[in-house]
Image: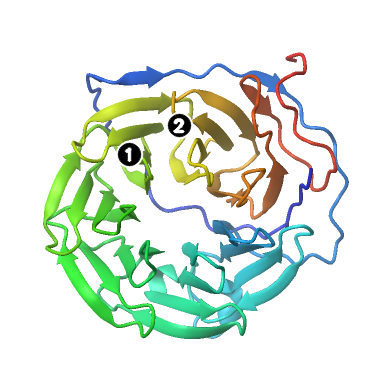
Amino acid sequence: MTIYRLNMSNSLLRLLIKPIFCFALALLVSVIQPSATVIDAQDATEQPSQIPRFDAVHDIAWSPDGTQVAVGQGSYVCDYEDFSKHAVQILDAATGQVVSQLVLHACTVTSLDWNHDGSQLITIGGTDGFGVVWNMATGKPISVSRSYSMPGRLADLWSPDETRVASIAEGTQEALIWNPANGQAMFTFDTEGFYFPYAIAWSPDGTHLVTANGYGNVVTWNVTSGESVEQLSGHTGIVSAVIWNANNQIITGGWDDTIRIWDADTGTPQKVLVGHTGNINDLKLNSEGNRLASASDDGTVRIWDVTNGQQIQVIEDDDRIYTVDWSPDGSKLAYGGLGGEVHVIDVPQYPQQNTTVAPVSPMSNSPIPDGTEEPR
């Protein structure tokens, strides 16, 4: 197994406060309760000291060919004099070494998204409001989308056909669609009072978007008309992650510590996945779409079976985890967070039972237990 850790300096704690009041809702869906045994990860040796130190890890994106991991990092304090402090780091996925840096953002890099062949990468500079499309062969920007009306920009995502990019920003009620070739706005639509959007995703056919916000609202939108289609109600706090999968399901994760799976056509809830004990910050599907990884402030990454909602595995860490991503072949996970460390860890393809993996050490050549060991 490849496990590496990049040590990064401490950053400011997140200033957002989890909503105080959460109201109990009667659930007309299946609630999946996890049950996990605890298994220790094996000891590992330290990564060589020449690995540079960065800041907290806010987003991770694995390149489509599996050879590189892009890392969005930086403190919550913008620096307009030294842009290198918030440079996107491109790591060798096998060694963890930095192979290149993308320097343009003055503020925390909050979102990364590769195109299908890995030739281009979109990065978002949070408070600086920049969305940048990079040529990964040259390391130079292709286009820059600058929206002065979208401070706290949180996410930009390629459309399925890669002719458009969708953006949302905390503190606005707008969604922006722009042209990645020149950075120009193509369409802006008002999200009708659904303030403080936190997450956005395209439908598989590119005709709709789904947004999630700070008040627990999840809404689907017609991209052509800008009209809302369905509102998905169930979360009782900030919804910070959303996916629209190939089976026309919408998967959401929020600060009510739950993951919810919905029918995208009707807005009907199908499953509630329970197990996390802290804010859920990120959700990622593997390439086959049958495994879901979730990252949380409770210091765990959890792996779920999307079909039945069962928890498969728990990976424990000592700090809040902000982001997670699968390798293209689904054999590894990369994750990071407040502790400022990037972990790449092997994941069994077909775990035989629920397992909990203790905090990983920096380097190891041993696989994570697959659930066959005796529980501690």
Q: In which quarter of the image is the N terminus?
A: top right
Which picture quadrant has residue 10?
bottom right
Percent x, y of residue 279: 44, 39
Local SS, label 2: loop
Q: Residue at x 71, y 44 (%)?
A: 345
Task: Report the residue marked by disc 2.
Answer: 306
Q: Is mark 1 on a helix, strand or loop?
A: strand
Kindly report the distance in space between the C-alpha atoms of the residues bearing marks 2 and 1.
10 Å
How many labels were placed on the picture?
A: 2
On the image, the x and y values in percent for residue 106 come to 49, 77
The correct choice, above or below, for 227 with respect to 260 in the image is: below
Is any part of residue 105 visible from this angle?
no
Q: Where is residue 200 in the image (x, y as percent from the top left)?
A: 33, 55
Q: Are marks 2 and 1 in contact (CB under 8 Å)?
A: yes
Kind of residue at badge 1: Gln
Which residue lies under the disc numbered 1?
249
Residue 215 visible here: yes
**Closer-to-camera residue (198/324):** 324
Q: Residues within 10 Å of mark 1 (few under 14, many from 20)?
A: some
Q: Which of 85 and 361 is in front in this view?
A: 361
